[in-house]
Amino acid sequence: MTIPACPPPLLALSPWRRMAEQAFSRAAGAPLIGGNDVDLLIDAAVHFDAWEASIGRAQKNVFLENYIIRNDAVGRRIRDALVARAQDGVTVCVVRDWMGCLGSDGGGFWQPLLAAGGEVRSYNPPRLDSLLGWISRDHRKLLVIDNAEAYITGVCLSEKWLGDAKKKMPPWRDTGVRLRGPAVAELVHAFAELWSQLGKPLAAELLQSSGAEAGQVDVRVIATQPSTAGLFRLDQLICAMARQRLWLADAYFVGLPPYVQALSAASRDGVDVRLLVPGTSDIPAVARMSQAGYRPLLEAGIRVFEWNGSMMHAKTAVADSRWARVGSSNLNIASWMGNCEIDLAVEDRDFAAQMEQQYLADLDNATEIVLKKRKVHKIAEAGGRHAGGSSSRAAAGMMRIAHSVGAALGNQRVLGQAEATSLPWIALSLLALTALGLRWPVLLAWPAALVAGFVGISLLCRYVHSRRRNHAGSKK
């Protein structure tokens, strides 16, 4: 399949071009940085080889941040590479997500690194003074070497990404990039900012970057934290500015109405909008909810494809042969609003062309979803799927349900067909809960009392914690 030519670009120095650059920078909270070199990495085996080689060359520092780190062959391989560098005096700092790594890297997994002088910190473990704090996760997948080379990706440290030849399960499909150049300093800053939230800040000398140019590629580093929504604003803007095509790949798509409306508006305006997603999820309820959202996309002319392999875990976008995004963020509210995420937006024709060619190659192993006789159908049966993914999608699913219910109760807008079909099930569940409460009130009273008690204790602990912190700050 060939890619049609894009309309000629706007003049580099035109007022409209300057306005677009300004809009991108303000929406994402990320300036455009030139002079970089970016390499596209496909699938986990390539990532693991590159990570191990780069860690082995480290002379000053290694910063690793990942959502899932497992005590398996891959996890031990990368950990041992970190241990070797720490033993040689290299500063090694690791941030693991508490929930993502729960039950995965225990059993003294990190003890060799700690003994060698490395440091490991956990993001957002449960706290009594923040009962709902667990919703926010560190979903980033970042590796920085000597503040000169970095990797941004969707790949976690787990051999699950490599598949299982014995079970005839192919590797997971995932995408990442290797970055060199001035933009690496932004990644160092993003890591250091999160590291300082978890304990003592990094020493100033560990934050220094040379800033030397390594190529001619312009990029933006989009490092988001909970409630910042920088990538959500940028994704909306890309929908509005795409002129010919917008091709998306996402592992856990749960489209919020504003984003679905933006995609639909682009499609109805003649933009070739495509969405590539996995066929299944490790959370069946969220998978069904994602599939229930196909209809408004298909009715707007958006083409939807399901990956036929074991798991499609890539989070990418490419628009008009000139703009692309690769990183850790999924197209759902958990990534947009709730998590720490990191993505690289690349404004370069050569890189965008690579992304488009890879996207077309991926569609050769995908099944297109179509509307037929008022139902959603697959063009062909897809086999070989296996569950996979990360747990924060449950929060995304619940938020989507809450959004639909709120819109219905408040009569805020006309509900789409996919949203409306979920209302009877929600209504029946609430009516069943009502009947249970009327028949056996104690069954609801006790849980309500316990929740109220826990919330009260949490708020009191938060107050005491804040008072102590403010008092300590006033003494300095």
Image (cartoon, rainbow, N blue to C red):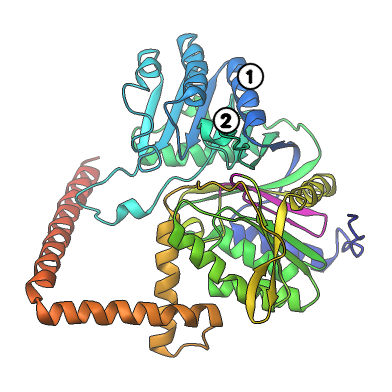
- The secondary structure type at the circle numbered 1 is helix
Mark 1 or mark 2: name the one nearer the start of the chain. 1
Is 474 inside the magenta-drawn segment?
Answer: no
The span picked out in magenta is: 310-328
- What's the distance in space between the residues labelled 1 and 2, CA to CA? 13 Å
Other-residue count near label 2 (Cα within 10 Å), few / some / many at <14 / 14–19 / ≥20? many
Which quarter of the figure is the N terminus placed in? bottom right
- Identify the residue at image location x=38%, y=33%: 104
Residue under pointer 1 = 53
From this viewpoint, is residue 58 visible? yes
Is 312 inside the magenta-drawn segment?
Answer: yes
Picture layout, residue 461 above or below residue 89: below
- The secondary structure type at the circle numbered 2 is strand
Q: How many marks?
A: 2
Residue 371 occupies quadrant: bottom right
Front residue of 15 and 68: 68
Residue 18 occupies quadrant: bottom right
Amino acid at dot 1: Ala
Image location (x, y in percent) of residue 266:
73, 73
Front residue of 112 and 311: 311
Picture layout, residue 345 above or below residue 114: below
Amino acid at dot 2: Val
Other-residue count near label 1 (Cα within 10 Å), few / some / many at <14 / 14–19 / ≥20? few
Identity of the residue furthest to the top in this view? 88
- Identify the residue at image location x=59%, y=44%: 310
Residue under pointer 2 = 144
Which quarter of the figure is the C terminus placed in? top left
Could you tell whether 118 is left or right of 240 in the image? left
Checking the image for residue 315, the label placed there is none
Residue 462 occupies quadrant: bottom left
